[in-house]
Amino acid sequence: MIKLYKNGVYLVNGSEIIEDQPKADLQIQAETGLSKVTKEDAKQGTIAYGILKDHNCSKDIHKLQIKFDKLTSHDITFVGIIQTARASGLEKFPMPYVLTNCHNSLCAVGGTINEDDHMFGLSCAKKYGGIYVPPHQAVIHQFAREMLAAGGAMILGSDSHTRYGALGTMAMGEGGPELVKQLLNRTYDILMPEVVGVYLTGAPRKGVGPQDIALAIIKAVFANGYVKNKVMEFVGDGIKNLSVDYRIGIDVMTTETTCLSSIWQTDQAVKEFYEIHKRPEDYKELQPDRVTYYDGMVYVNLSEIKPMIAMPFHPSNVYTIDELNANLYDILDEVEKKALISLDHTKVTYTLKDKVRNGRLYVEQGTIAGCAGGGFENICDAVDILDGKYIGSDEFSLSIYPASQPVFMELVNNGAVAKLMETGATIRTAFCGPCFGAGDVPANKGLSIRHTTRNFPNREGSKITNGQIASVALMDARSIAATAANQGYLTSAEDIDVTFKKPSYYFDSKIYENRVYNGIGKADPSTELKFGPGIVDWPAMSKLSEDMILKVVSVIYDPVTTTDELIPSGETSSYRSNPLALAEFTLSRKDPAYVDRAKAIQMAEKARIAGEKITSANEELRLVYDTIAGQFAIDPEKTQIGSTIYAVKPGDGSAREQAASCQKVLGGFANIAKEYATKRYRSNLINWGMLPFLYNGELPFENGDYLFIKDIKKAVADKHSEIKVYVVNKGMKEFTLTLGDLTDDERKIILSGCLINYYRDRM
């Protein structure tokens, strides 16, 4: 079904895979007639290399400085980004920047603050020259597909699922500060990434959808880190057997592999996509060179993949639906054991065995939504499966969210909406809520099957710290529809007799022309920004001091810690424009005591900055100072006091910068980790002036211990590879941390205390 090559591979003529091994060059010469092929030359044959080279501003192709063509954000990220950019000297948007409103669309929590954010965004589009997409018009990624993507282009978005590779656009999802850099005419600085080929062959079986293919790939590559921080390049003879909608559905889920970005070879089908969307000039043919080298290869036989299900609580926890139904209790037992990793700090009793009715798994809810599920073809195929059936009047419900108003309009025009409504399903407007816990929250202990992007704990909106728990399993729209046709009993789409009609799609651009504000090239500096009471400036942040005292305020031993666990989604999203209010939710569903612990040590730092003598009022810190003074001279005026957390592998999931910034707002100066799950989370730490420490081994400290770092400022400035740290509580026990690779600018940002300070200093 899926094979991972142990070594790099050469792809010859776009079809023959030759593994990198002795005499591979002779085999290539025999196939091509070329006299000499070097690995370095062949690496330049990837589609990814060409796009990155075209966007690189540095003289060193191995150390990229990327300028993107376009930027995009949604309404729980653009306020903070623009506020940061304004504080750093923003005058106008230097490139097309699209502000969509698809996350806090409901305006249902926190009074006026959601709509206040929207009006702030509209005023920014007018003042700085951007595009504003009002609520309910389109989810961020669908608008980008329809209106922004272009062959050979690069787009940076402040959402982790910024993926438009199937359209020939290399897109990346990053935390807000990386967009700020672009808005200030700076660059995105990374080492040239490795490129892993994804060779698709064969054709999908009837009833198998893009989510099934994506989940199978995620299962194969997530745990082993096969594509982590690399570019996935999709090639192969199987691509021609996939519609563009189908390719998009696979592509958007590449984020869950932890890859950096994705790109696909393009063809006539992609050309027709651009023609349908009235942008034929944006098509570009993209193919790998005659001899191309990939740093790895994921070989996928599409015809062997069956309908899949990702059980709670991760997209990589994947089984075939047939396998689950045949081994129900055994697999549910495995799922419950894995769930304990995420739920061990709670008092919630978790089981899915109570969902078994008459030997079959019963689910209470189905949802097809967002950038992954809400596409035209997914919904049309679901309609064909449900045509003439009904979902029943028991607990099971089904909701459908078309990804944009143009998609919704065409579903109305071709009768699909009427057919869905006849089944008992409900149709909603374009909204990302079901993907991050702000829409269709199931009942306590409910199980929801969703064609969305993630199924982390609380992604469905429950609150385990309040005794509420629900679960999401990821499935393709077709099997969700099959389950709905059986009124909630888990069913594979392969088990349904159906004829897929595959209606044509017609794109009506007037919907956007009549409603979306396009201010590109029309910046009006005289426009006054509209601030609601929930929009609060970032607090002042200090520069890095000579020495540092850190108190460990949380230790997390889970194999992976998601950004949802660092700062929950759901209703907390309403406070994304207020750094102080949002910070109150930090780690609230993973370590509820964290905020009070962090605030307690932050009080000492505030007192130190104010020039107060903190040791006389803080017995704990007096002992810390006394212990340090027994070995080093310590000057309180030059020694910051802050907090840190340890997690084995933090940062999987969303690009949200708040997973880092909330810690900084509460006085966090560092993270310590065995490794970071994603490049974007580590970048968020750096951009907020936090030290991204690495430590591999048995921890020498415990929660509540104090750490002392002598000459930390000098170590960062002088590029020390190792940094000595002392566990104060254990008699100044010494151990060593590392910082990993840091660019010169990243070091300066950390020294400045945060990105805002860095740019303000440069001005």
Image: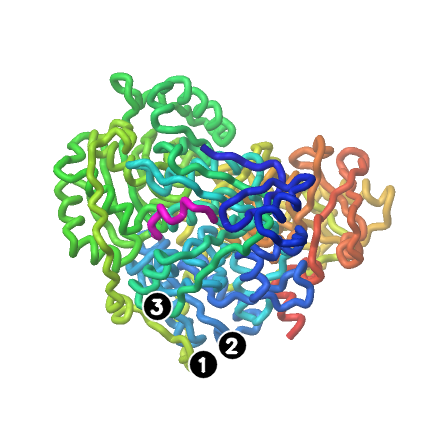
The residue at 55%/47% (across/down) is 11
Q: What residue would you read off at disc 3? A: 279
Tag 1 and tag 2, C-beta contact below 8 Å: yes
> Callout 2: helix, strand or loop?
loop
Whether residue 732 sits left or right of residue 289 in the image: it is right
Which stretch appears magenta?
A: 235-244
Q: Is residue 762 above or below residue 215?
A: below
Q: Is residue 395 magenta?
A: no
Residue 746 percent coordinates (x, y): 67, 59
Q: Disc 1 versus disc 3: distance between alpha carbons? A: 30 Å
Quarter of the rendering occupied by the N terminus: top left
Disc 3: CA contacts within 10 A as few (<14), some (14-19) or many (>=20): some
Q: Is residue 64 above or below residue 238?
A: below
For residue 537, say whether it is visible: yes
- Residue type at numbered disc 2: Glu
> Callout 3: helix, strand or loop?
loop
- Which mark's residue is nearer the viewer, 1 or 3? 3
Q: Is residue 240 magenta?
A: yes
- Residue type at numbered disc 3: Arg
Disc 2: CA contacts within 10 A as few (<14), some (14-19) or many (>=20): some
